[in-house]
Image (cartoon, grey):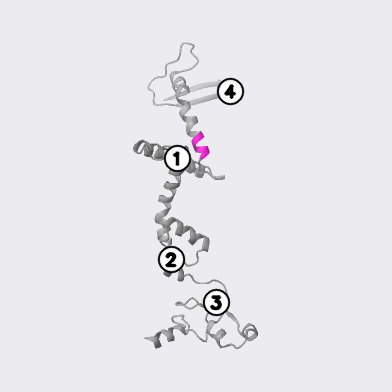
Amino acid sequence: MLVPYIRKPKKNLIMLSSHKDAKFSECGKKSDINLIYNSTKGSVDTIDQMTRIYTTKRGTRHWPLSVFYTLIDIACINTYTLYIMTFPDWYKKKTNRRRFYLQKLGLQLIKPNVEHCAATIIGLQTNIIMSMDAILKNKVTKTTQNQQQPSGKGRCYTCSKQCSTKSEKLNKLAKTTIVCGKCNLYVCGKHSQKTNIRCECVNEVDESE
């Protein structure tokens, strides 16, 4: 049911309610819908205050995104209320236990994605890998970290070992972007295999076997 309510001249407020009938008060200025809203609007103000303290909103010019942020904030408040009703003794002595709940909720939501990204961390920055270690509690293995390939250019590792002096290395050796697929060292076209890019570390493994 839609009920119009003129607060001020030329300002008409239309209220949507589930009431079947709108009865006006004795003074005849406000209906039951107005009176019920005024008696319960404290809850609305409380929700607005809670969303302002801990919110996911960011500056945006797109109103659908702003509505989406609001829905996330309200959903977090509702889940927090249900969680406290289920576990009333959880952080009972803490005055900011809602912050601990939101941190726990956020970690639980991003943990599956972090586990998926931890399988291949090639190209990720060091601070991101350290954050993944903190979330997964050091579940990112060293073997996975060793798969991270260097970016940019570098001089061939095999050619550098053959140079007698550092000046000879800097003057005669050109940089390359090719990286060995096993030891992650730079390798030139002379010391690499085109089908499967590897340096002479492959021959050393074969001789040891």
* Secondary element at tag 2: loop
Q: Which residue is mark 2?
A: 120
Spot occupied by residue 101 in the image (x, y as percentages of width and height): 43, 43
Q: Does the CB distance between marks 4 and 3 fall below 8 Å?
A: no
Image depth: mark 4 or mark 1 in front: 1
Measured Cα–Cα span from mark 4 to mark 2: 63 Å
Of mark 1 and mark 3, the one earlier in the sequence is 1
Of mark 4 and mark 3, the one earlier in the sequence is 4
Badge 4 crowding class, 10 Å Cα cut-off, few under 14, some 14 to 19, many 20 or more, is few
Of mark 4 and mark 1, the one earlier in the sequence is 4
Task: Look at label 1 and name its amino acid.
Answer: Arg
Image depth: mark 3 or mark 2 in front: 2
Secondary structure mostly seen in the magenta stretch: helix
As drawn, the label of residue 177 is 3
State which region is magenta.
Answer: 49-53
Spot occupied by residue 91 in the image (x, y as percentages of width and height): 41, 40
Measured Cα–Cα span from mark 4 to mark 3: 71 Å
Q: Which residue is mark 1?
A: 97
Spot occupied by residue 161 in the image (x, y as percentages of width and height): 55, 85
Q: Residue furthest front?
A: 93
Badge 3 crowding class, 10 Å Cα cut-off, few under 14, some 14 to 19, many 20 or more, is some
Image depth: mark 2 or mark 1 in front: 1
Q: Residue furthest left?
A: 86
As drawn, the label of residue 10 is 4
* Secondary element at tag 3: loop
